[in-house]
Amino acid sequence: MTKPPKKQRLSVYLEPEVMRALAAHADRREQSRSLVAEAAIASFLSPDAAERQEAATTKRLDQLDRRMTRMERDLSISVEMLAVFVRFWLTTNPPLPEPAQAAARAQAGERYDAFVSALGRRLAKGPKLRQEISEDIEPTRDAQ
């Protein structure tokens, strides 16, 4: 009497992309395709597979939430910085007389180019303004 083999044979048809991915994964792991396929099927059929997938999805969503929070903070800083600058500029710069406006426009182009260059240097080497602003500072009543 012979014992039946412990493993049973299964023939499966795979899409060419799936077969390439299986072969590449097996080669990287230096394992047989059969062993990788068996592990994948076992993982898929495992009762905790859904829980692991949910945990991975939750982790990814938490990362995305933190990124969105940082982006919202950065945007808020940018908008507030622009508002403070515009208010400051409007209150400290008197309007120019008509004859001086043409010369000011010509000089404005040069000053703008210098500003863009300075901004480019600042962004290239940091630190960024948002990194200099603490999240721990509570706003004062007179600043609002």
Image (cartoon, rainbow, N blue to C red):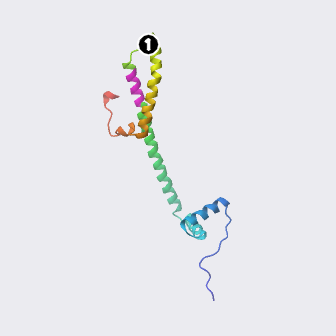
x then y, percent, for residue 117:
44, 32
Is the residue marked by circle 1 packed among few (<14), some (14-19), or many (20+) residues within 10 Å? Answer: few
Q: Residue 44 in magenta? A: no
Q: Would you say the magenta stretch is mainly helix, strand or loop?
A: helix
Circle 1: element type: helix
x then y, percent, for residue 73:
42, 38
The residue positioned 58% from the left and 69% from the top of the image is 38
- Residue 21 as seen in the image, left or right of residue 121: right
Depth check: 130 or 108 in front?
108
Q: Quadrant of residue 2?
A: bottom right
x then y, percent, for residue 58:
48, 53
Find the magenta span and give its range: 80-89
Depth check: 9 or 141 in front?
9
**Amino acid type, label 1:** Ala
x then y, percent, for residue 121:
42, 36
Residue ID for mark 1: 100
Q: Against 66, is 74 above or below? A: above
The count of marks equals 1
Q: Quadrant of residue 138?
A: top left
The residue positioned 43% from the left and 38% from the top of the image is 123
**Placement of the N terminus among the 4 image quadrants:** bottom right
- Residue 80 as seen in the image, left or right of residue 52: left
Q: Residue 83 in magenta? A: yes
- Residue 41 as seen in the image, left or right of residue 88: right
Residue found at the very far bottom of the displayed protein = 1
- Residue 131 as seen in the image, left or right of residue 22: left
**Placement of the C terminus among the 4 image quadrants:** top left
The residue positioned 67% from the left and 63% from the top of the image is 14
